[in-house]
Each structure stands twice: as C-alpha cells, then as structure tokens.
Image: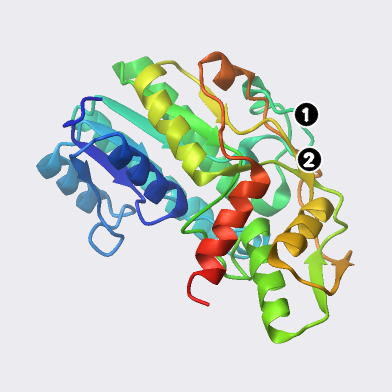
Amino acid sequence: MELQSKIFVAGHRGMVGSAIVANLQSKGFTNIITRTSSELNLTDQKAVADFFASEKPEYVFLAAAKVGGIVANNTYRADFIYENMMIQNNVIHQSYVNGVTKLMFLGSSCIYPKLAPQPLKEDYLLTGLLEETNEPYAIAKIAGIKMCDAYRDQYGCNFISVMPTNLYGFNDNYDLQNSHVLPALLRKFHEAKVNGVHQVEVWGTGTPLREFLHASDMADACVYLMQTYDEKGFVNIGTGTEISIKDLAFLVKEIVGFAGEIVFDITKPDGTPRKLMDVSKLTGLGWKYSIEFRDGIEKVYKDKFLQHA
C-alpha cells in the first residue's frame, strides 16, 4: 500500500475497524474511505455494488460484522449467520468485480472446533464440531475464509484472511447483555465500586482459559500483514499467552480497586474450555505484540471509566 492508496475500512466505528483507521493514520496513510452503517448497509447487495463502482477502493479491510458474546450469539442465531454472510458476500464479491488490489477478511477464533488441540494451529480448521452457542457466527466466518480462498483460486484475487484472538481496547462494547467477558467485567467491577456493592457475580466456574490482545496491536498486525502476506489460508493473530477467567476477574478487581468479593455463578455457561492461538506462523512472518496485558487493561479502564469521572 502506498501512503496515498485508496483504502476502504469496512466497520470503522467498531473496536477493530477504528483501531485499523488509527493505525493507518499514524503511519501516514491519507486516503482512507469509511461509511457508517446508516450511510452504507453492507447487507444490501445493490448498495454495496454501487459503492464499489463509484469509489473504486484499491485496498479493503473487512472488519465489519455483527458481533457479541455468548448471550447475543445464542439468542440471535439467525441474525448472526444471515447478516455476517451477507456482509462478507457483498464486500468480497464486489472487491473482485471492481478489481480491488488486495482485501483482508477478519474472522474470529471461534472458527476452531470446540475441543481442538491447544494451542490452536491454523490447520485445525474444520477438524471437529464447533462450540454450539456461537456456531452460526463461526460458520459465517469460516465461509468468509473459504470465499477468499475460492476467489484466489478461481480469479487470482489477492484476498487474505486473519483470525484474531479475544480482543479488548478503546471503543469496546460494554453492554452487559451483548459484550465479551473483559469489558463486561470492567463495567461490573466499576459499577459495584461506585455504587458500594459488596459482591460481583462472574458467569461460570472461572476455569476456562482465554487469550487477550489489545485492539491497537491487532490493528498493527493487520496493517503489517496487508503489506507483507499474500497467501491462501489465514493467519492467527494473538499473543500466545493465556489467563483463566478466575484470574482475570481478580486482575480486573485489583485494577478497578473493588474491595468486595467475587462470586462465581456455576449455573451459567463457561463456553469453550480453552482457546489459545498458536502464533508461530505470525511470529515467523515477523510480527509480535507489544502491549502487555495489565498495562492494556489499565489504559482501557482509565479511558472508559475514569477520564470523565
């Protein structure tokens, strides 16, 4: 990508998309195109076709998606598969039709089988059954990877895919019904502290292990791979380190300064027991994360909850 290349970041208001825009701007890229969902409905085939025909972007970061945590994924199963498939189909196909130089599709670590060996290597895709609660979302994301590969095979398109681990960062979703575990914990502990509540409930047993990557690091990896990676398949993006939900809860409690107790509600689902990325392919390509976990959480907490206090 040249600094003046026309770059379309789909999903620029989300945590990942906004981080990609910020990273591109910090590196001096000046011709970034964005559209809000009200300006361009990516599930609308004609609207997307018209947009690509008129704007003719050279590079596309496909970070737009319908996303959520366990509750949202399991409750809105039809919405998750339909909307994500429509977004992908429209953007990937129109990128081919309009001669986009390169496209990057962003997936999710939930594409891996629920009980896949750990850490998760790229070639474990489609080797077992998916986690039931987010199967529709995962299938949509798998379809996106395969679509990029198919357009590469049939048409010679330089379409690549990346699979981020669990992300956190600025512009995250803190809705307690639809958010992921880390922002949900930050909000729960902060509100309990502010309201003088003496106990915070955490879903599940606390035993599942999770890996977390700051969205700013994720964006840096995406821009790096857009410049350097041109192959079939996909690349895991993560840290290669993990923490239990229990230890995460106590870490967030400490950072927030909550003095009460933590109660684990074992009637609630745990989700996948362990989900750690094998990032040897990524590090072999020359990229490694830079934001340490505790530092990252402290920055996010300060930005979201303390700057306006």
Q: Position of residue 224 (x, y in %)?
A: 41, 26
Q: Position of residue 166 (x, y in %)?
A: 62, 45
Report the Cα–Cα distance between label 1 and label 2: 8 Å
| Quadrant holding the N terminus | top left
Query: Within the image, what quadrant is residue 150 found in?
Result: top left
Q: Amino acid at mark 1?
A: Gln
Q: Secondary structure at mark 2?
A: strand
Q: Amino acid at mark 2?
A: Arg
Query: Within the image, what quadrant is residue 30 found in?
Result: top left
Q: Residue at x 25, y 54 (%)?
A: 35
Lateral position of residue 227 relative to residue 72, left or right: left
Q: Residue at x 63, y 71 (%)?
A: 176
Query: Within the image, what quadrant is residue 222 found in?
Result: top left
Q: Is residue 29 visible?
A: yes
Up/down of 305 relative to 163, above or below = below
Residue linked to disc 2:
274
Residue linked to disc 1:
118
Front position in the image: 298 or 115: 298
Front position in the image: 216 or 69: 216
Q: Residue at x 46, y 17 (%)?
A: 232
